[in-house]
Amino acid sequence: MNTMFVRNTVDTAFARIMTRFGFAVSNSDDTSVVLDSSTVRINVTYDWRDSYEVDVALSQLQNGIPSPSIPFNLGEVFRELQVPNADNVSFLQSSKEADVVAFLRETAERLATYCHSCLGGDATQFEAIAKRRSREALEYTRKVQLASIRERADDAWRNKRYGDFIGLMEGFANWLPDVDKKKLEYAIKQSRP
């Protein structure tokens, strides 16, 4: 792989964004390019040595310092800004240069089309993405926690140990699927004297 491939590809793919929104390359090496405007940072990386993952992430710059410290990935940005097929178009893993070139061109086009508020440094948009990140992290944590008790809860339900079922599931009442909510309601009724 040509060590200038990432830089050249980003320069070409993001040329319109660089011109329109005042971005310039602030750092680059053989796997990454950092584009900065006065208010926004775009990190583009391509791990062509190991995983072949292409990553594009955005941060708001405050006095030249990225905020948050962990940049928003493309999926978070695209989901918040309702880019069509956000999850399907926000990630690439490929060892083929042509795929990487096409992905970065399409990504830059989607950013310019749907994410101009972010590219322009709109603080309220970055706040909304941060709130989305927090919500999605909380939802994921709840799913993991629920999955960790699921087997015990199902066993308690099958064996009509309604008190155990309630103890396991009650803390998740607001996030349970309808069928589990009905089971919980039934278990509560059954456990009353």
Image (cartoon, rainbow, N blue to C red):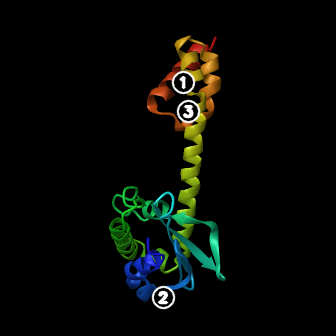
Secondary structure found at label 1: helix
Secondary structure found at label 3: helix
| Cα distance between the residues tagged 3 and 2 | 46 Å
How crowded pointer 3 is (Cα within 10 Å; few <14, some 14-19, many 20+) is rated as: few
Residue at left 49%, top 60%? 76
Secondary structure found at label 2: loop
Residue at left 54%, top 70%? 126
Mark closest to the chain's N terminus, 1 or 2: 2
In the rendered image, which quarter contains the N terminus? bottom left
Task: Name the residue tied to disc 2.
Answer: 22
Mark toward the viewer: 1 or 2: 2
How crowded pointer 2 is (Cα within 10 Å; few <14, some 14-19, many 20+) is rated as: some
Three-letter amino acid code of the residue under disc 3: Ala
Residue 106 location (% of width, % of height): 34, 70
Residue 115 location (% of width, % of height): 42, 72
Three-letter amino acid code of the residue under disc 1: Leu
Is residue 112 shown left or right of residue 153?
A: left
Task: Name the residue tied to disc 1.
Answer: 184
Residue at left 38%, top 77%? 112
